[in-house]
Image: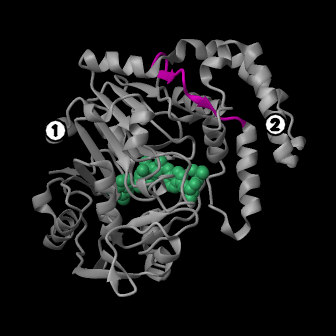
């Protein structure tokens, strides 16, 4: 289905372009029918990538899968999945997901590989995440509580532990205990946690992990040279990028193109396509500025209709109008070649749609997304208005068949952000996608 319609080449990355949850999982699942390798590059179990799989024996029902660490290519038996070195990996979560797949008769045997340089995330990272949020009080980030920030902090402060170290368990255990002691001095409540159970779990796991480890970058380069098609799965979104997002209300990695490259070892110039996923409106979970947020009944209506509740934490997602300033910013930062506009069906029935076209501060139009969050919270937003449509678009599979006002809406976004919208999501299921 996807193969004839999107010409993406042998090395493609799929990236979130807003504040996450744009619908990356669904496109990755569709594309992995033709990609032999799917690689997660960054983030950790903060990600929640949803895929609906129709039951072959009863096509009116579907099974919902939400992947936090397992790459979203797992539902295609021909696909091998690699957890890239840029990921922070909580092994119990990974093995829960593997167990769930096996329970659903999806074989994972030999299909999940892990780059040996991948940093491990432990329970104490999650505890520290919670303690840091508590200390921040009303300035809290609203993290997913998955320990992401503390684990990346250990990585960059050069005290992190990488998965290959598990193979020499004695050495691993010594380092683990040293780290835990160091962190206990900084976070007193850690004294209440005993890591013995976790250590014994990890010790048992080491033998199981060994055959899954590969030298990630070398493996990927060999695969690439041998003509295997590789799809890199981004997590989170550009506006959550620790460098380019709404800092400090961001995650602790680079969901943008830089993180795709460092998180896999695949050089930027080798990519044949970079597909940005954009919701036809905008959502955000957690705190931080959100210029086009709808705090009224309309925002609530979109949340209900779009099922906008976090795939990882179940928190209600904040909803707002499509914002072409951040759309254009993501196209620029990532050098996107294609856009997948998702959830267009959710906007059906709205009489008027608004699109943010510019940010204005002190009477001046800002050139891009400002760094200063005080400006971001207080700037004016310029909107254009477009008429909506009422027809159900869920069964439409060709752009030409969309209602004229829906086509106009898509074409206007394309014009404003300067990147081709080559696919449009019109529903939850694998086949609910229009390819242009
Ligand atoms: P991800 O983190 O980017 O993979 O996105 P999530 O899975 O967190 O959230 C996206 C949600 O939107 C999921 O529940 C998807 O099933 C759903 N979704 C994706 N594309 C579409 C679409 O085109 N239409 C509708 N109605 N839902 C969609
Ligand atoms: P996917 O891949 C939506 C947000 C959190 C919080 C901030 C920091 O499903 O799109 P963290 O736990 O990373 O320290 O939290 O980043 N966040 C996400 N929001 N989707 C995600 O991933 C996210 N990953 C992190 O809500 O605001
Ligand atoms: Mg998600």
Mark 2, other Cα within 10 Å: few <14 / some 14–19 / many ≥20: few
225 to 410, vertically: above or below: above
User: 146 or 217: which is nearer to us?
Assistant: 217
Location of residue 212 with respect to 273 vertically, above or below: above
Q: Distance between the residues labelled 2 and 1?
A: 51 Å
Which residue sits furthest bottom?
363
Residue 353, compared with residue 415, is above or below; it is: below
Residue assigned mark 2: 182
Report which quarter residue 140 is drawn in: bottom right
**Residue at image point 58% right, 66% down:** 287
Of all residues shown, which one is farthest toward the left?
Answer: 400
- The reply to whether residue 60 is in sight is no
Percent position of residue 3, x then y: 19, 35
Residue 155 in percent (x, y) is at: 62, 35
Identify the image quadrant of residue 403.
Answer: bottom left
In percent of width and height, residue 267 lies at 33, 31
Magenta stretch: dominant secondary structure: loop
Q: In this view, does 404 lie to the left or right of 263?
A: left
Rendering quarter of residue 28: top left
Give SS at disc 2: helix
Q: Does the residue labelled 2 lie within 8 Å of ligand 2?
A: no
Residue stretch in magenta:
108-122
* Residue on which disc 1 sits: 7
In percent of width and height, residue 315 lies at: 59, 61
Q: Does residue 64 appear anywhere in the picture? A: yes
Residue 326 in magenta stretch: no
């Amino acid at each position: 289905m996807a193969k004839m319609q999107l010409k993406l080449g042998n090395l493609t990355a799929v990236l979130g372009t807003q504040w996450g949850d744009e619908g990356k999982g669904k496109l990755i699942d569709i594309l992995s029918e033709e990609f032999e390798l799917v690689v997660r590059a960054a983030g950790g179990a903060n990600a929640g990538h949803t895929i609906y799989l129709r039951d072959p024996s009863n096509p009116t029902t579907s099974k919902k899968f939400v992947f936090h660490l397992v790459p979203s290519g797992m539902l295609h038996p021909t696909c091998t999945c690699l957890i890239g070195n840029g990921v922070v990996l909580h092994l119990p979560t990974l093995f829960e997901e593997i167990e769930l797949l096996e329970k659903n008769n999806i074989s994972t045997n030999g299909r999940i590989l892990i780059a040996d340089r991948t940093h491990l995330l432990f329970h104490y990272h999650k505890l520290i995440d919670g303690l840091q949020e508590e200390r921040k009080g009303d300035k809290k980030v609203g993290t997913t509580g998955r320990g992401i920030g503390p684990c990346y902090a250990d990585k960059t402060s050069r005290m992190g532990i990488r998965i290959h170290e598990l193979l020499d368990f004695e050495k691993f255990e010594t380092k683990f205990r040293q780290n835990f002691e160091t962190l206990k001095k900084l976070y007193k409540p850690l004294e209440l946690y005993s890591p013995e159970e976790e250590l014994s779990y990890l010790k048992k796991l080491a033998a199981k992990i060994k055959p899954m480890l590969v030298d990630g970058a070398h493996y990927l380069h060999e695969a690439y040279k041998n003509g295997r098609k590789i799809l890199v799965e981004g997590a989170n979104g550009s506006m959550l990028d620790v460098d380019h997002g709404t800092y400090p209300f961001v995650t602790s990695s680079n969901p943008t193109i830089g993180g795709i490259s460092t998180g896999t070892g695949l050089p930027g110039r080798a990519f044949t396509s970079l597909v940005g996923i954009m919701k036809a409106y905008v959502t955000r979970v957690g705190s931080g500025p959100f210029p086009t947020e709808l705090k009224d009944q309309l925002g609530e209506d979109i949340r209900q209709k779009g099922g906008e509740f976090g795939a990882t934490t179940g928190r209600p997602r904040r909803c707002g109008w499509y914002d072409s300033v951040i759309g254009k910013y993501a196209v620029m930062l990532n050098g996107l070649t294609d856009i997948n506009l998702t959830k267009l069906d959710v906007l059906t029935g709205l009489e008027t749609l608004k699109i943010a076209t510019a940010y204005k501060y002190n009477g001046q139009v800002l050139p891009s997304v400002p760094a200063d969050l005080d400006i971001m919270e207080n700037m004016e937003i310029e909107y254009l208005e477009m008429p909506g449509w009422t027809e159900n678009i869920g069964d439409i599979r060709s752009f030409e068949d969309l209602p004229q006002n829906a086509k106009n809406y898509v074409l206007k976004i394309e014009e404003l952000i300067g990147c081709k919208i080559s696919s449009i999501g019109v529903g939850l299921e694998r086949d609910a996608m229009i390819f242009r």
